[in-house]
Amino acid sequence: MSYNIIGILVRKPEAGSIKLQEVLTRYGNVIRNRLGIHRDEVAGGIIILDIYGDNNQKELFYKELDSIDGIEYKHINL
């Protein structure tokens, strides 16, 4: 069994937080767990996702994340 983890750094919430929330809602079917941590140092926060399911849906999710201004993310498989 593998785990797919995504770490999202929200650097500029004013630029992309609304779109990010819409994308997270749209792809809720592949998000098993979500943890949000507010960080004053970056004027935004960190979101950690545990995703699972259909690989096509996950790839579409990554593409949508790529289109959001003000965030950075990394994906790891464990």
Image (cartoon, rainbow, N blue to C red):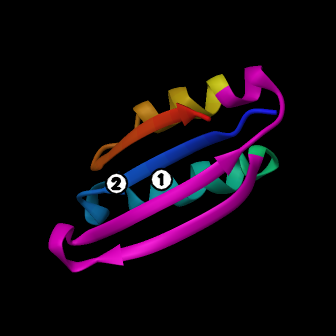
Question: Which element type, helix, strand or loop, lies under badge 1?
Answer: helix
Nearest to the observer: residue 12 or residue 51: 51
49 relative to 46 in the view: left or right: right
| Circle 2 residues within 10 Å: few <14, some 14–19, many ≥20 | many
Residue hosting label 2: 9
Q: Number of labelled discs?
A: 2
Q: Are marks 2 and 1 in contact (CB under 8 Å)?
A: no
64 relative to 15 in the view: left or right: right
- Which residue range is magenta in the image? 31-58
| Circle 1 residues within 10 Å: few <14, some 14–19, many ≥20 | some
- Residue at left 52%, top 57%? 48
Magenta segment includes 41: yes
Main secondary structure type of the part rendered in magenta: strand
- Residue at left 70%, top 49%? 26
Residue 43 image point, x, y percent = 21, 72
- Residue at left 24%, top 59%? 12
Type of amino acid at the residue the image marks with label 1: Lys
Badge nearest the viewer, 2 or 1: 2
- Residue 55 figure quarter: top right
Residue hosting label 1: 19
Q: Is residue 41 above or below residue 64?
A: below
Question: Which element type, helix, strand or loop, lies under badge 2?
Answer: strand
- Residue at left 42%, top 37%? 74
Residue 17 image point, x, y percent = 40, 61
Q: Is residue 16 above or below residue 64?
A: below
Type of amino acid at the residue the image marks with label 2: Leu
Residue 50 image point, x, y percent = 66, 50
Which label sits on residue 4? none
Quarter containing the C terminus: top right
Quarter containing the N terminus: top right
- Residue 27 figure quarter: top right
